[in-house]
Amino acid sequence: MSDTVTLTINGRSITVPRQTTILDAARQLGIDIPVICYHPHLTANGLCRVCSVEAGGRTQAAACVTACAEGMVVQTDSEPVRYGRRTILEMLAATVNLAEAPEILALIAEYGADAARFPDAVQRESPIHDDNPFYLRDYNQCINCWRCVQVCANDAQFAFALNFDHRGYFTTIGTFMGDGLMDTTCVFCGQCVGVCPTGALKPKRQALLEQGVDPDDIFYQTRQKRKRKP
Amino acid sequence: MEATSTHAIDLTLLESVLVRYYGRSRSALLPLLHEAQAIYGWLPREVQEAVSRTLRVPLADVHGVVEFYAMFYNEPTARRVVRVCEDIACTLRGADAVAQAIEAELGLQPGETSADGRVTYERVPCLGMCEHAPNGLNGTRLAGDLTATAVPDFLAGVHPEPEPKIYGTPLLKLGRIGKMDPLSFKDYLAHDGYVGLRRVMQYTPEQIIQIMESSAILGRGGAMFPIGLKWKFTRGAPGTPAEKHIVANADESEPGTFKDRAILEGDPYSLIEAMSMAAYVVGAENGWIFVRGEYPRAYERLCHAVQRAQEEGYLGRNMLGRQGFHFNIEVRLGAGAYICGEETALFEAIEGKRGFPRIKPPFPTTNGLFQQPTAINNVETLVAALTVARIGVDEWLRFGTDESAGTKWFCLSGHIQRPGLYELPFGVSIRELIQMGGGVRPGKHIQAVLIGGAAGAFIGPEQLDAPLTYEGARQHGFPIGSGVVMVLDETADMRRILYKLSHFFAHESCGKCFPCQIGTQRQMEILQRISHDGGPRPGDRAALMDIGFTMTQTSLCGLGQTAASAIMSAIQLWPELVG
Ligand SMILES: Cc1cc2nc3c(=O)[nH]c(=O)nc-3n(C[C@H](O)[C@H](O)[C@H](O)COP(=O)(O)O)c2cc1C
Ligand code: SF4
Ligand code: SF4
Ligand code: FES
Ligand code: FES
């Protein structure tokens, strides 16, 4: 078995090592496939599906998790592909507040998605968690990209403070029995805040500054002692 | 909430359970949670903490698992849960009146627990007993053919337990049910038990694979993969027998499906024999049966059957007197999640995780349970393979058509005089099946038939002559799926049925990928309004078609890919439903 495969993407031929994803192969050709959940340093789970492309199968294929195959013919920007992306974006816009997710807002504009398409939609609502001096969690802005859960667990920190509440549409990120982060195994490494694409996780200083709080006050509000670990 | 969750929980009750679990791995999480919940009725914080310590699973992960499965509770819940089916087959036969009678009798609304803490009441998706619709579960006691007047008996636990209703001919695979004691190993042997396995053990695994390939058995769980090929791939995958698995998929949660339950309850040893044959062919030492949490009687009988087979030397080391033939089976109980019928989600559940489907490839034959080579099959597929072993491939091929060999189980339900499980050779038409079932009530006519389950498709009365074969299904644009044939006469409120279908998928979407997680919700919102909250609006049809296209084309797994299929088929046949 050869170590490389040759395929065409939007009519252009390319040879790549076996196991290369369609996303990476397309990038080598300078073809841009949109992504939302994908992050180059984290395990790709194929969640958002806006990277879906036509690759000759019964259904479209998520480019970030689908390996290139010999003779594959890929279309990254056909009408069915754009149709699916547009609808995912329209549905997502009716789910949570995307005001601080500039990349997603750009995609909504690029694909002509009507963010007001589903006016009666039930939004995924959640109280704001202000339970520690370091960062805020506002899951009204959370798209369930799993990045924070992953960095908190096997992808980086092995702290296992975050997991999920509920399932299906009402899935939200949660802690054990809803405990405040000070009472969990969180080590306040801040990695989740760093990878969050939507502003759902935000450093407390930044949130307070945005609210117009005086920087001196912010110093007092955020300098509490860290919880001592047992 | 706070007050109840901190009141004294007597952890000493749990000690005798925990000692059996010390040192075990995360894969023991679901069984331990089941055992703990049997003690307390729910899973208080202290109990989850003890579970977390015992199995060394992070607290947040335990929480995520409890939250995922509908039958695990982290809020005070009674030990006895009364569940009434609110799905379509039961709705067609009067489930609303039964539910109202239960609510009046208990004084509870769905999701509520009585003030004395002794009973919790829920409305739930299909319980897999649709031939007895409307159905309920009182704790672990099954109940069928419920009426409003039967509710006091049901709640008192004296309403008769339903038995599978079996019809058809030839009963190649269902023949033993009702004729033998499902608990008795001796009785099983007296009814041709282990004839099939002993016969094929004269052959090499490769020869048996060839027999299975010529039997042309396709997977009965919906994906129609040839069993011979699946066993061949798993046999050929790198790994020792100790690293390979045979899994029986007994999750059976597709609305309208009640076929595997007949075997699980009425002929459990045949599943064990069939899995043993698979183990012999594949070269696998580990067997698993994953049964849905709503099948308590099937679970109990399977556990008993496995134990008896072990005692008789028909499972274990050097079984059936054959040196080097080692195989054992562990029975696992689900906890209320349709998605765990999807093969990779099922593996995750056995591994003690939320039932999130995995990305495929890699496929189970190389990366299945615990990332090891696994042959996972539907119960009916396994029993079909065993039947071929017992009667021979030539006899098997006398039934059915060239492309669709042998017999198939059809789950006939809804507005039909004689609902039941029909074993028939492939090739019977839908009309013939309905006639065998006594047709619709006198004076009524057929409005629609749902084929293949919630993930299937509707057909209209003009398509009734379509043959029930794989090739016929392909030609007429419906899936055979799990063999559901649900009849709806003109009294059925189609808009309400479509809403119920959408409700099922919104309830059961795992939430992993965006198109299905959000699409099932948006689809339900629109159909809810159309059905009983204001009626259709311009743009609804386009919105439903957009959602349907997107879920079908871009979802991660089969649930999202089929969550719109029945609904879109109805919109195409009867556009006025949504406009
Ligand atoms: C959402 C979903 C639910 C499923 N539920 C079941 C089930 O309850 N029982 C089953 O045998 N297969 C079910 N399947 C199919 C399994 O993934 C798998 O294809 C099957 O167990 C393979 O066995 P077979 O080849 O014998 O059919 C389901 C698939 C999906 C996508
Ligand atoms: S909080 Fe942020 S990183 Fe975490 S899942 Fe939500 S959007 Fe993703
Ligand atoms: S299609 Fe639905 S059930 Fe399947 S992974 Fe996506 S959200 Fe989960
Ligand atoms: S970027 Fe590929 S699924 Fe999200
Ligand atoms: S048991 Fe009620 S619909 Fe199947």
Image (spheres, coloured by chain):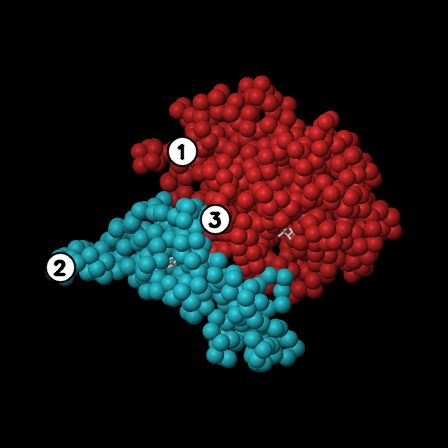
Chain colours: A cyan, B red
In the picture of the structure, the residue carrying the numbered disc 3 is B522
In the picture of the structure, the residue carrying the numbered disc 1 is B76
- Camera-nearest residue between B386 and A174: A174
Residue B303 picture quarter: top right
What amino acid is at disc 2?
A: Asp
What chain letter is assigned to the residue under label 3? B
Residue at image location 57% in from the left, 21% down from the top: B148
Residue A159 picture quarter: bottom left
- Camera-nearest residue between B401 and B282: B401
Number of numbered discs overlaid on the protein picture: 3
Residue at image location 54% in from the left, 59% down from the top: B554
Which mark, by number, is residue A214? 2
What chain letter is assigned to the residue under label 1? B
Q: Position of residue B167 (x, y in %)?
A: 77, 34
Q: CA distance from mark 1 to mark 3?
A: 31 Å
Residue at image location 62% in from the left, 37% down from the top: B128
